[in-house]
Amino acid sequence: MSGQPAGRTEYQQRKTSVRAMKPLLRAGWVIIMLAALLFGSPKQAGAQGGFEVSDVQVIYNFGEQITFQARIQSPLGISQASVLFREEHEPITRVEPLTLAADGSASFQYNAAQNILPPFSIVIFWFQVTFANGDTATSSVYNFRYDDNRFDWRQSAQGPITVHWYAGDDAFGQAALDSAHASLGSIGQLTPINVDDPLNVYIYADAQALQDTLYLGGSDWMGGHANPKLGVAMVVIAPSPGQGIEMDTEIPHELAHVMLYRSLGDGYARMPVWLNEGLASVAERYPKPDYDNALKLASQKGSLLPFTELCDAFPSDAGRAYLAYAQSQSFVRYLRDTYSTTGVSALVKAYADGLDCELGATRALGVPLAQLDTRWRESVLGQNVVGVALRNLAPYLLMLGMALAIPLWGALKMLRERKQDELYE
């Protein structure tokens, strides 16, 4: 894959501002810009501070190695050359020395197996040289997308969404694209939709393939995965008669994470895990039927997980993690039905502002999280039936007591007066 120099947007801005200038000056600049576009090459940076970079290439095998190549030349004499690179959304820049040949060809091989980069991330890189006189200079900035090139991806796009898949025919890809677009409707009922930036959905044909991708990219295994910063969702869906239901379940879940991030920004990281995953699960157009069975069984056994323990992370055990997902979906749906989407939005905002699990619920809904947990168990799972019945009847019992209190007090008063009369007699 070839590196592409940055700076096209800057050229366009210059062309826009020039239109306001005098005709002669405008014409002169247009000629200069056209010449640059016609004769410039996307692989050649041109002279930068006394040196020239050309033939820029990046060759890689996903999860194994990345090779940076270029030709670097200068009449000043180069004593040292380096390549600098980082993932687009990360602040840490790696600096690696290049092997520089007499003809100016330079290369560096990066061990991606030990120094991992997120799959489908944008990697930006540039070159730096030290001249014989000790001065330094840097080149233009280039970038490449670190795709999982172990597979021959096909793609289909519409609007901001692009679906990528390698197993299945054109109909499979179109069905996935339709599902992704339909997902935005269900997600929009939970959080604001932002489709200004691209959305990419990658569909793996089996769980092991996605597991390997996440492992090579530095993430733990999970049923699906979203990298909200990149606008990337990765799911497992094999071509099958039931593929439609899987698409309408897995794709909305992962895209919901992306939309939540775009809505909250840095506040996304402060969301409790149960709320984050619960909202994504509620966005699924076909809820998993096994969730209800898991909840009923755990309720009967008394093994439900307190939501105060699901704020920072889900259990590592697969069975308990599945129960955590089931609880989160049911709990968030209960909160939405009880407090409306306005209440859920207030809850999301409270947590995004940095309030802890208990205080966030108290501020947004007026009820501590532990008490909300209890009410959910009683209302949805039918726990503490007698207590709930008494609590529901309490207002009526109070009114009945007040209604009976007055005549009873009057009868007691008459009885006391009668006894006093008898004493005087």
Image (cartoon, rainbow, N blue to C red):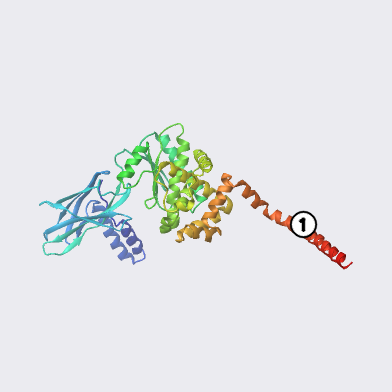
Q: Is residue 208 left or right of residue 249?
A: left
Taking depth in this image into account, of 296 and 347 the one nearest to the observer is: 296
Rendered residue at 41%/56% (across/down): 269
Residue 74 visible here? no
On screen, 262 above or below 169?
A: below
Residue 192 image offset from top left, x and y in percent = 49, 54
Residue 222 location, quadrant: top left
Q: Secondary structure at mark 1?
A: helix
Quadrant of res 93: bottom left
- Looking at the picture, how far across and down is residue 164, in whole percent? 37, 41
Q: Position of residue 209 (x, y in %)?
A: 34, 38
Closer to the camera in the image, 48 or 345: 345
Kindly indicate the quadrant of the structure image that contains residue 73.
Answer: bottom left
Left or right: where does residue 237 sit relative to residue 108? right
Give the number of marks. 1
Residue that numbered label 1 is attached to? 404
Q: Quadrant of the N terminus?
A: top left
